[in-house]
């Protein structure tokens, strides 16, 4: 299916038609994955606005990813937020959507290029986006034979374009074998996360997710869920997770901007809990979907409401 997208993009410092935002085949980022990106969701409200969820936090991680790579961009967080909002107003989306900011080595140097004097270019485009994975159906996941990139190979807490070869391989294997999604382990065999999602399990009514030092991307949705759990009085543990714990978990779900919250019904062909969406997953999902649409006063500061 052809990818749908909104008409305008930000490219080389200005707003252009999305189809005119083109780079050379010699571009360093295309050759080597020398780029950093973000994925932000906007939720459409028929009253005439879009609720953008945690935009500042996404750009903070974006800039931190560049800092980890040791490169710069001429854009501050404030400028990135402002540019995105202006572009959104120009695109006037009338549906739930996804914002993809992207910063990359735009030079045509032959060698993999992360030189400080070579500041990264910034581009932003936008797409309509409903579900990335089904949120209601119950997902089947498999533990991948691919290991999650480790922090000392490609920094895993940075959202680096080249890292996503790791995700693509795991996803390719999972879908070829008939599963919806992959779960990746760390090099030393502990549970890290999904191909583009963090992972939560429930054991003994405690919500558990991998520690951020276990090679996971420090997900903004993950952080959101940990805050919800605290506010709802659900006990949490952020710690190393063994593979075998996946098989005896009462509940499991993926979290991420794309996936939102998608409950898992099977892992490695073992039914999770009673095979239904669990109590804790349900509570967290309800609050999540209400919050991202701007309906929870308590979490309003996470939403940027943009009239379109
Ligand atoms: N892990 C990976 C590898 C991801 O690509 C994503 C999606 N950005 C996540 C976790 C979830 O992060 P977030 O909640 O910030 O979208």
Image (cartoon, rainbow, N blue to C red):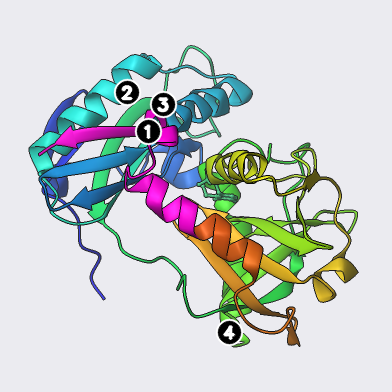
**Mark 4 or 1, which is nearer the eye?**
1
Residue on which disc 1 sits:
300
Q: Is residue 292 magenta?
A: yes
Q: Image point 76% across, 47% down: which residue?
A: 235
Circle 2 residues within 10 Å: few <14, some 14–19, many ≥20? many
**Mark 3 or 2, which is nearer the eye?**
3
Q: Nearer the viewer, residue 287 or 245?
A: 287
Residue 278 spot, x, y in % from top left: 64, 71
Q: Which comes sooner in the sequence, label 1 or label 2?
A: 2
- Visible residue check, residue 22: no
SS under mark 3 = helix
Residue 226 occupies which quadrant of the picture? top right
SS under mark 2 = helix
**Mark 2 or 4, which is nearer the eye?**
2
User: Real-space Cα distance between discs 3 and 1?
Assistant: 13 Å
Residue on which disc 4 sits:
176
Q: Which comes sooner in the sequence, label 4 or label 1?
A: 4
Task: Kindly identify which numbered label has been placed on residue 56.
Answer: 3
Residue 172 spot, x, y in % from top left: 57, 74
Q: Which residues are magenta?
A: 286-308
Task: Kindly identify which numbered label has been placed on residue 80.
Answer: 2
Instruction: Tell me whether the residue at label 2 lies in contact with that at label 4, contact meaning CB atoms closer than 8 angstroms.
Output: no
């Amino acid at each position: 299916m052809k990818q749908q997208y909104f008409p305008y993009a930000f490219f080389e410092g200005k707003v252009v038609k999305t189809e005119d935002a083109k780079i050379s085949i010699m571009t360093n980022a295309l050759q080597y994955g020398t780029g950093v990106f973000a994925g932000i969701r906007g939720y459409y409200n028929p009253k005439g606005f879009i609720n953008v969820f945690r935009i500042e936090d996404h750009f903070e991680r974006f800039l931190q990813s560049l800092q980890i790579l040791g490169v710069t961009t001429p854009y501050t967080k404030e400028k990135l937020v402002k540019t995105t909002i202006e572009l959104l107003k120009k695109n006037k989306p009338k549906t739930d959507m996804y914002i993809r900011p992207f910063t990359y080595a735009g030079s045509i140097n032959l060698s993999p290029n992360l030189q400080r004097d070579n500041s990264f270019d910034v581009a932003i485009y936008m797409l309509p986006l409903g579900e990335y994975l089904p949120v209601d159906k119950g997902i089947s996941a498999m533990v991948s034979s691919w290991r999650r990139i480790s922090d000392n190979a490609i920094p895993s807490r940075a959202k680096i374009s080249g890292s996503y070869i790791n995700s693509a391989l795991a996803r390719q294997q999972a879908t070829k074998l008939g599963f919806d999604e992959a779960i990746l382990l760390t090099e030393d065999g502990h549970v890290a996360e999904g191909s583009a999602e963090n992972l939560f399990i429930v054991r003994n009514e405690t919500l558990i997710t991998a520690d951020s030092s276990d090679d996971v991307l420090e997900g903004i949705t993950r952080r959101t869920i940990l805050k919800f759990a605290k506010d709802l009085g659900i006990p949490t543990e952020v710690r190393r997770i063994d593979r075998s714990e996946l098989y005896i978990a009462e509940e499991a779900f993926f979290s991420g901007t794309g996936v939102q919250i998608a409950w898992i019904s099977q892992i490695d062909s073992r039914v999770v809990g009673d095979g239904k969406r669990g109590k804790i997953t349900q509570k967290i999902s309800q609050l999540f979907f209400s919050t991202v649409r701007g309906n929870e006063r308590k979490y309003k500061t996470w939403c940027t409401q943009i009239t379109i």
